[in-house]
Image (spheres, rainbow, N blue to C red):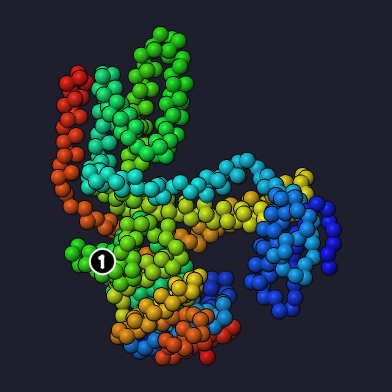
Amino acid sequence: MIDLNDVIYRYPDGTPGLNHVSLHLQAGECCVLTGPNGSGKSTLFRILNGLAFPQSGSYLLDDQPITESYLRNKKNAAAFHRRIGYLFQNSETQLFTRSVEDEVAFGLWQLGLSEEEVHARTDHYLQMLSLTAMRHRAPFHLSGGEKKRCALAAVLAMEPQVLIMDEPLGGLDEEGQRWISDCIRSLKREDRLIILATHNRSLADSLADRILTMDKNHEIR
Amino acid sequence: MMTGWGKHHLPIRSSTAEDSGRQRGETGRQGTVLCLLFAETGDTEPSPVSLSPVRTVPCPPFNYPSMTESILKILSLLSERDLPGQIPDHTAGKSFLKDTAPALRLFTALWCILLCALSHNAVFVLGVLAVELVRLALLPAKSLLHVLKKVIPPVLFSLLILLPGFFLGHPRTMLTISMKVLTTVLILAILNEDLRWQQITASFHALHVPQVFILTLDMTVRFLDLMGRMSQAMYEAVTLRTVSSRGKQYDRSRMKAAGGILGTVFLRSEIMAAEVAEAMECRCFDGTFRVYEKHKRGPADYIYALLIPLLLAAFLLTGR
């Protein structure tokens, strides 16, 4: 499903981000990415989400090369982002609408779904993530765990085939961590590719079909 | 090792090899809190809850630092917690108003303001003002105070501006305009109390305001709040870390710190803006934005809508 071949990425100031990273991921797989801070996990995720592009090497999604010129086409970009859901490390910046329900519905409107479909899916995912009671609240007034749930609901509502989560347990208390971990476990049962970065060893061990470790040289071991 | 350093003491745990950076940070914070407690109570001995082994460092009396007033003003404005999105929903118990579409309430308010502005007859404006004052009186005490705080300054300002007219032989102008200002601001302030910020911006959609404009407006308010919180946290961090005595040098370093806070907030805002843009891109944002609206028209809407022709009739009957 996802193929990265000898990807090299450098930041605009020349700092290395990724060094000769090659990866092959299949649908239905749960891949956990670990490694120290600054090893390039988030950079890899940005590349997988089409937010950054490697200077050399290739990125293929179902044999389709994902390049800057490919994503410049709005139709291609929409089709691509529809297939890949990304839960950002910082939920604070991922939530930008006036209410929780608007947040969940945002992506659905963008997909051009009918009003009934948008309402049905919004209700379903709000219920799934236990957000129904706070659907009218402004997302930026929620607690850290609630924000994370809201961001996850917004991503899941688009029903992506690939779900990428950057440190989903970051900044959460014990209960919040347990809640999100259980949620990810339930998502794993579905036939989708899950890639997540975490420092939580027990989560990695309990979820992963494959654990990849990035080192300080920005390479995957 | 304990050392006496004057009246106020700040116990800080001696750093050890096994201390992680995080632990040191927590200890530092705890030390500062203890310092503040001593300063307030006048205690000279370390609290029994302080960690051991401890050493003491001098701590000035409990004084919040003095940054220049203008910078403080900016920071306090940024950290203003009473942003529209946080205003509690006062309509919770009022089922009639709650059932009425926010867009209709917004439109009626704007319609009323327009008619008041066009009216040459004090009777109409007085009538509207009387109704609004009754509504104001029905608000809870806290909301009433909130509304009055918003209403009084502009009315006083308009009176002050028009005061020369009073002495130059046009006392009526002063009264008419001040009354119109009072009515207008009162209508808007009560509307603001009745509706949450989200409802107001959602109403713009019904009034055919471009959706991207609504989104931008929402996000501006949201990020003002976020930046405010951020600057508040940084300001507190600077405050807690400042333990030197007062003086010119001290003030200069504080000034630099304040400048640093604003600079950091600006830089972070840039990073956040980029992150938000990426988050929107990931959710297929193509420039169109729609509001999630499920309000169904009910009897309350139709009853409330009657106000629009009634206001017009009153306007025409009172001779405009």
Residue occupying image coordinates x 37% and y 32%: B185
The outermost residue toward the top is: B169
The one of B315 and B98 positioned closer to us in this rendering:
B98
Horizontal side of B307 relative to B171 (left or right) equals left
With respect to residue B147, does B279 lie above or below?
A: below
Q: Counting other residues with Cα less than 10 Å from the Cα at mark 1, is it few (<14), some (14-19), or many (20 or more)? A: some
Residue occupying image coordinates x 39% and y 86%: A30
Q: Can residue A20 be seen here?
A: no
With respect to residue B146, does B174 lie above or below?
A: above
Q: Amino acid at mark 1?
A: Asp
Horizontal side of B112 relative to A148 (left or right) equals left
Residue occupying image coordinates x 19% and y 34%: B307
Provide residue B158's location: percent of width, then percent of height: 43, 24
Assign the C terminus of chain B to one quadrant of the image. top left
Q: Which residue is mark 1?
A: A123
Provide residue B82's location: percent of width, then percent of height: 46, 46
Q: Can residue B78 be seen here?
A: yes
